[in-house]
Image: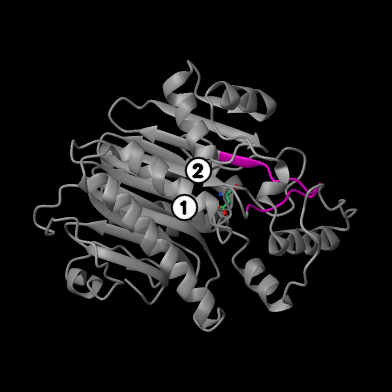
Amino acid sequence: MSAYTQIAIAAGLAAGLALGHCSSKAYGQNSQEQSWSIVIHGGAGVIERGQMDEATEAAYRDALNHALDLGGEVLSQGGSSLDAIETVIRYLEDDPKFNAGRGAVFTSEGHNELDASIMRGDNRQAGAVAGVTRVRHPIALARAVMEQSPHVMLMGEGAEHFAASQDLEIVAPSYFFTERRWASMLRRVDQLGLERPMRPEGAPDPMPVQEGALDIMEREHAFGTVGVVARDQAGLTAAGTSTGGTTAKQWGRVGDSPIIGAGTYAEGACGVSSTGTGEYFIRLNVAARICQRIALAGEDMQAAADGVIQDELGVMGGDGGIIILYDGAPGWSYNTAGMYRAAWSAQTGRVVSIYSDEP
Ligand code: ASP
């Protein structure tokens, strides 16, 4: 296994995984009885030990733990994997630490343009939205596209009209504003030699942002996209992803996250959510490619995930990672130095990890 590859279900790791941040909540099930599973990511990038202060690291671990609690609560009570995905991603979209919903990165014109998608493995229904600027929970909108419209993908204003017709929460664009993402975009715009955009109407008064914090964001490639793959007690595997895209993106750029097959995919017992340089993930059709290597070539989950992320994506020059569930077993593969990630299944128990030297 490559140094940068971590798969939570690797034989013998289960004991080590118990070292993960264990929850006090057991939901009345021991791991033998647990038939549901969930795996979560909060983005990949150059996330290395010693570069984050203790409080920041603890805040990420707490958020991932809480995300597991939320998903576990839905699934242990017999809720559907779609409900678990939506519940967890809504929470992460509200958390400004992640590049999804509130706290999303800015375009070079000073807007937050949000993308999300969701797919179910049993009948391959899917929903996606791109470039929405006023919908508080883009994942809820993607799900509504799947369940309440005859379409798979809606974009921009039309998607927002549809959101309003579905009674989804509409917010002012400034709701998504965070100072550190704004500062990070300005820095990138300066590097690109572009004109600095005006501070958005309704944004709070400017506050100083520590230069160090900006360095960290740059090393993280401003990743922080969020994704969830879950299997419920009825055996439905589904996957979802939500993002603000890439810092200082231009010209209506759309990445892989709302592209079914690239950023999100579910087919039968396989589900994948991606994070990384979207242009590469689109061209490689990463999420579907991994599931299809398992289904068509008979590869095991680890080999298929590594083959695409470590080999194919790496050779093309793309960086990032994926989370996967196959037959209820969670795993991940990434070719960056770290990935915010968490899993909970019968095989693994609870795992919350950030760095490459963790399970
Ligand atoms: N994949 C996302 C995009 O390219 C960004 C990310 O995962 O950080 O839009």
- What range is drawn magenta here? 104-115
- Residue 110 sits inside the magenta stretch: yes
Kind of residue at disc 2: Leu
Report the residue at 77% width, 72% height from top.
208
Which residue, as the protein is rendered here, is positioned at the far bottom?
Answer: 50
Asked where in the image residue 264 lies, by quadrant, the reply is top left
- Residue 91 sits inside the magenta stretch: no
Q: Secondary structure at mark 1?
A: helix
- Residue 170 spot, x, y in % from top left: 62, 35
From the viewer's perspective, tell me whether residue 177 is left or right of residue 307.
right
Name the residue nearer the viewer: 127 or 233. 233
- Residue 224 spot, x, y in % from top left: 55, 58
Examine the rendering and report whether any part of residue 135 can be seen. Answer: yes
Name the residue nearer the viewer: 323 or 308. 323
Examine the rendering and report whether any part of residue 238 can be seen. Answer: no
Which residue, as the protein is rendered here, is positioned at the far top?
Answer: 150
| Quadrant where the C terminus is found in the figure | bottom left
